[in-house]
Amino acid sequence: MPVVPTTAYAQAEDALALARALVNDAAASVFTDALLMPLLNSAYRGLQRELAENGVSVLAEQQDISLAVNGSTGVTNTELSDVSSPQLPTDCLMPHMLWERATANTADVFVPMEKFTSGGSMLNLQPSSYLRLWEWREDKINLVGASQAITVRVRYEKILPQLTLGTDPVQIRSASDPLGYATAALAARSRGARALAADLLGAAQLATEKLIQRYIRPEQIKGRRRKPYGRRRGVVYL
């Protein structure tokens, strides 16, 4: 009986096996897992950057963070960072959108917060019952503070965990080919085979483009109409 996979994610060893086959070392005589794993992780990070730059939402995550009122200041935290309490999600690369809701009002909907993008420091506003504004600066979310406990919903671009074992899942679907080719290109370059490395890198880029197309194709089939010339621009609420 064939083994039925429990997830659609491939494993790291699938990309490693492809990489070894491409550099003619299927037996792993030279390119062992220990040697290839750092190269695979480099290719993994590169693929994540390519997906993010092309607007692929596979790297988007969402988490609710509860901010309590500080007894000494009378307001909630004015920042969320890697060292604050509570802190930013450990896999957060950068936030995209924030919403807020009074923690006590669990039946209320989350209301979008406005991102402050004018540069400089956060506006010197007096805390009110809601946070209202946020900014991303120096790798932290800066807030005005609120006079009541607030739950903040953060939607952010996440960093996938590093691969360490061959059985680790690659958390990008259908990524074995771009990762295998890119890992093989790095392996060939490490041995001075620059022509082979360039050829493999081209194959990796093509496989990455095909993967991106498969992710963004559902957005392309939505019906859209071009606005006629001369029509006044309006605001569209989604």
Image (tube, rainbow, N blue to C red):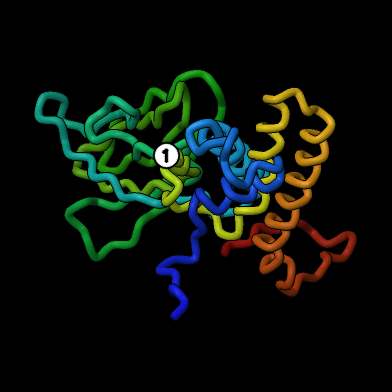
68 is higher (above) or lower (below) than 77: below
* Outermost bottom residue: 1
Tell me the residue at 33%/62% (across/down).
109
Q: Quadrant of the N terminus?
A: bottom left
Q: Position of residue 226 (x, y in %)?
A: 83, 66
* Outermost left residue: 71
Q: Position of residue 39 (x, y in %)?
A: 58, 33
* Outermost right residue: 229
Q: Is residue 166 left or right of residue 83?
A: right
User: Which amino acid type is marked by label 1?
Assistant: Thr
Q: Position of residue 160 (x, y in %)?
A: 46, 43
Whether residue 114 is visible here, answered yes or no, is no
Q: What is the quadrant of residue 183 in the picture? A: top right
Q: What is the quadrant of residue 235 in the picture? A: bottom right
> Of residues 53 and 3, which is closer to you in this image?
3
Q: Is residue 168 left or right of residue 149?
A: right
Whether residue 17 is visible here, answered yes or no, is yes
Q: Position of residue 147 (x, y in %)?
A: 21, 37
Q: Quadrant of the C terminus?
A: bottom right
Total numbered labels: 1
Tell me the residue at 80%/35% (across/down).
196
Q: What is the quadrant of residue 141 in the picture? A: top left
> Of residues 207 and 58, which is closer to you in this image?
207
Q: Is residue 130 left or right of residue 123?
A: left
Neighbour tally class for label 1: few under 14, some 14-19, many 20 plus, Cα within 10 Å: some
Q: Which residue lies under the disc numbered 1?
A: 164
Q: Is residue 226 left or right of residue 176?
A: right
Tell me the residue at 39%/54% (across/down).
111
| Mark 1 residue element | loop
Tell me the residue at 30%/28% (across/down).
78
